[in-house]
Image: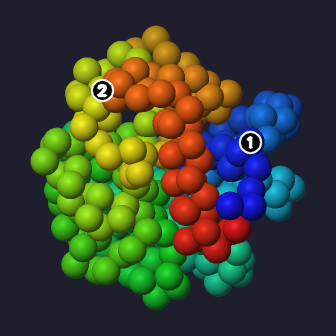
């Protein structure tokens, strides 16, 4: 296929902007593509800055559903402004809906998410999505708006939506929580290998786990065990998925 396996290892969802210069440099030494998501306008600017310095960083700009409030209209407009200034931005994220941790702002979240969907449609962008307890809602919005490229980050939704995700050609990500989160394990056991990408969601912490991009190399083993497949087969498949995603994004 004309690419080196190592170079197509990809962390599909990382908050790189939260790290200092030295740590970013050491993450870059891993020689993997990093889809760097943002949480708000300020972190979007920082993410773009990092991507200008490091060729393997793919910047995503957006407003995390946790940061949506009554005063975020300007925030969204400013993030949209970044898209006109920097045409190399191909992904919006982390965006979405959260009914689990922020149910009381769901209406505002919905309005903001629909604005991001419009931007994605207008400019042909991909989406990197957070949808805690709102998976069906998010999928419905994606379908209705003909969004063709989307990553459903840390998918822990209903098992019966996995087929729909596959039929639409969307991706789900696996992170270190696969080692301990039963619901996640059940999903990954049945999910077709060709919709799976790996992510760090670093530097998030979850039940004693410290998420970090260097740990994504270890995730393949858990996927292989769960699916009773060889490590080789799992690695190959996920590398191919990453390649397909980057091609669709026109990064490769
Ligand atoms: Zn995240």
Q: Residue at x 86, y 55 (%)?
A: 53
Position above or below: 56 against 127? above
Can the viewer see residue 124 in this picture? yes
Please, which residue is most extreme toward the left here?
Answer: 160
Q: Colour scheme of this structure image?
A: rainbow
Seen from the viewer's position, the closer of residues 89 and 64 is 89
Measured as percent of width and height from the top left, residue 190 is found at: 25, 37
Provide the secondary structure element on which disc 2 rests: helix
Image mark count = 2
Whether ligand 1 has any atom under 8 Å from the Cβ at mark 1 is answered as no
Q: Residues within 10 Å of mark 2 (few under 14, many from 20)?
A: many
SS under mark 1: helix
Residue 106 seen: no
Q: Position of residue 224 (x, y in %)?
A: 43, 27
Front-lying residue, 32 or 13: 32
Q: Residue at 43% across / 36% down in the picture? A: 174
Residue 248, picture quadrant: bottom right
Between residues 68 and 168, which one lies in front from this camera angle? Answer: 168
Residue 79 pos. (x, y %): 56, 70
Is 25 positioned to the left or the right of 62 in the image? Answer: right
Label 1 or label 2, whichever comes before in sequence order? 1
Report which residue position mark 1 lands on: 6
In the rendered image of this protein, does residue 43 appear above or below residue 223? below
In the picture, the quarter occupied by the N terminus is: bottom right
Asked whether disc 1 touches disc 2, contact meaning CB atoms under 8 Å apart, the reply is: no
Q: CA distance from mark 1 to mark 2?
A: 26 Å
Furthest toward the top, the residue is 208
| Residue 133 percent location from the top left of the image | 20, 44
Q: Residue at x 37, y 61 (%)?
A: 170
Can you identify the residue that label 2 sits on? 185
């Amino acid at each position: 296929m004309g690419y080196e396996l190592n170079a197509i290892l990809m962390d599909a969802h990382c908050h790189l902007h939260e790290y200092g210069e030295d740590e970013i440099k050491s993450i870059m030494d891993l020689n993997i593509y990093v889809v760097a998501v943002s949480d708000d306008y300020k972190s979007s600017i920082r993410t773009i800055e990092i991507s200008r310095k490091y060729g393997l960083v793919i910047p995503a700009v957006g407003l995390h559903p946790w940061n949506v409030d009554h005063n975020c209209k300007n925030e969204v407009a400013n993030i949209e402004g970044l898209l006109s200034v920097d045409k190399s931005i191909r992904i919006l994220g982390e965006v979405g809906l959260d009914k689990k941790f922020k149910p009381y702002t769901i209406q505002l979240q919905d309005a903001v998410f629909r604005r991001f969907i419009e931007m994605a449609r207008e400019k042909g962008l991909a989406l990197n999505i957070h949808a805690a307890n709102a998976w069906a809602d998010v999928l419905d919005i994606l379908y209705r708006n003909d969004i063709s490229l989307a990553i459903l980050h840390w998918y822990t939704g209903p098992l019966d939506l996995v087929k729909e995700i596959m039929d639409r050609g969307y991706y789900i990500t696996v992170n270190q929580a696969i080692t301990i989160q039963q619901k996640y394990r059940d999903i990954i056991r049945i999910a077709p290998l060709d919709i799976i990408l790996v992510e760090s969601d670093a530097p998030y912490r979850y039940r004693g786990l410290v998420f970090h991009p260097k740990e994504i190399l270890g995730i393949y083993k858990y996927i292989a065990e769960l699916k009773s497949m060889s490590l080789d087969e799992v690695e190959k498949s996920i590398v191919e998925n990453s390649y397909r995603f980057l091609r669709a994004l026109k990064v490769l």
